[in-house]
Image: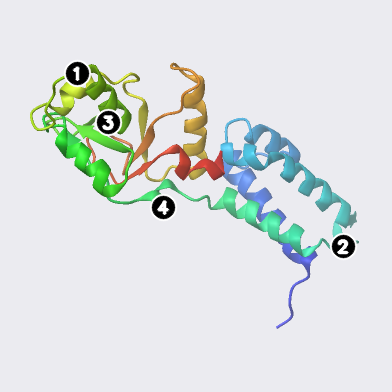
């Protein structure tokens, strides 16, 4: 079987991406690729992240093809690394990775639990955040080792066997510093959520974590948790 030329792969991928933009972003209305790219990047973090490279690829597409009487003639062949990079970016846009890829067992505790339970979870499982549930098993807060340490420092005589999680959370500095997201959220949108959290009150502080459920609802079972370091490569 004949191996396709780089130009064939590049142009085929370009056409697929252009069709994706037209059908998925602009409901079939005609716009130039650059117009779709410019407008789509305003509210799509995936396109925004690769926007500058895509503008360059658009210019490359125009440079390697000479259009005469609507019969495309290739006048140059792109390098392997160009085709590989463009194919990667196109796949990220058309089939983006979802946060369900971060699915894992999430260790939780109840407001009514004594503080010894989350301490043990943090120690044994080497985790930094423990979601806290109320009596309806809804997520209401996040507990971390920093909050526990602050609570211990503020009390001269305490018992981890009798003090409850709810009592310790009184000392949490930034309450509600998390967000629950649906499992079909793209990793790029999740990264954008982290970036936006840095601009909100309290400013200059990212969310402690993003919690994943099937539909992004607090009453649903947690299917995963993402901290900033997990998703840093997408920021």
Give the number of the disc on residue 184.
none
Q: Residue drawn 45% across and 44% down?
A: 230
| Quarter assignment of residue 83 | bottom right
Image quarter where the C terminus lies is top right
Q: Nearer the viewer, mark 4 or mark 3?
A: 3
Nearest to the observer: residue 45 or residue 171: 171
Q: Residue drawn 35% across and 20% down?
A: 174
Q: Secondary structure at mark 4?
A: helix
| Quarter assignment of residue 117 | top left
Image quarter where the N terminus lies is bottom right
Q: Secondary structure at mark 2?
A: strand
Q: Are marks 1 and 2 in contact (CB under 8 Å)?
A: no
Q: Which residue is mark 2?
A: 74
Tell which circle, 1 or 4, labels the residue nearer the N-terminal end. 4
Q: Which residue is mark 1?
A: 155
Q: Is residue 173 above or below residue 120?
A: above
The type of colouring in the image is: rainbow
Q: Which residue is mark 4?
A: 101
Give the CA separation, mark 1 to mark 4.
41 Å
Q: Secondary structure at mark 3?
A: strand
Q: Which residue is mark 3?
A: 143
> Could you classify mark 2 by the number of other residues whose Cα lies within 10 Å: few (under 14), some (14-19), or many (20 or more)?
some
Q: Nearer the viewer, mark 1 or mark 4?
A: 1
Give the CA separation, mark 2 to mark 4.
40 Å
Tell which circle, 2 or 4, labels the residue nearer the N-terminal end. 2
Q: Nearer the viewer, mark 2 or mark 4?
A: 4
């Amino acid at each position: 079987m004949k191996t396709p030329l780089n130009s064939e792969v590049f142009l085929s991928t370009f056409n697929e991406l252009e069709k994706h933009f037209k059908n998925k972003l602009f409901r079939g209305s005609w716009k130039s690729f650059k117009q779709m790219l410019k407008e789509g990047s305003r509210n799509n973090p995936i396109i925004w992240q690769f926007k500058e490279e895509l503008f360059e690829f658009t210019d490359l597409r125009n440079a390697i093809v000479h259009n005469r009487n609507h019969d495309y003639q290739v006048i140059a062949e792109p390098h392997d690394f160009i085709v590989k990079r463009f194919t990667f970016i196109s796949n990220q846009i058309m089939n983006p990775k979802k946060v369900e890829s971060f699915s894992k067992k999430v260790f939780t505790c109840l407001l009514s639990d004594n503080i010894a339970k989350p301490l043990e979870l943090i120690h044994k499982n080497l985790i930094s955040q423990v979601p806290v549930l109320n009596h309806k098993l809804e997520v209401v807060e996040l507990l971390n080792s920093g909050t526990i340490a602050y609570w211990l420092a503020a009390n001269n005589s305490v018992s981890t066997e009798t003090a409850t999680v709810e009592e310790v959370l009184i000392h949490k500095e930034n309450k509600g510093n998390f967000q629950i997201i649906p499992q079909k959220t793209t990793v790029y949108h999740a990264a954008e959520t982290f970036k936006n959290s840095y601009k909100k009150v309290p400013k200059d502080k990212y969310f402690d974590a993003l919690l994943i459920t099937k539909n992004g609802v607090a009453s649903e079972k947690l299917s995963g948790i993402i901290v900033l370091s997990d998703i840093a490569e997408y920021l």
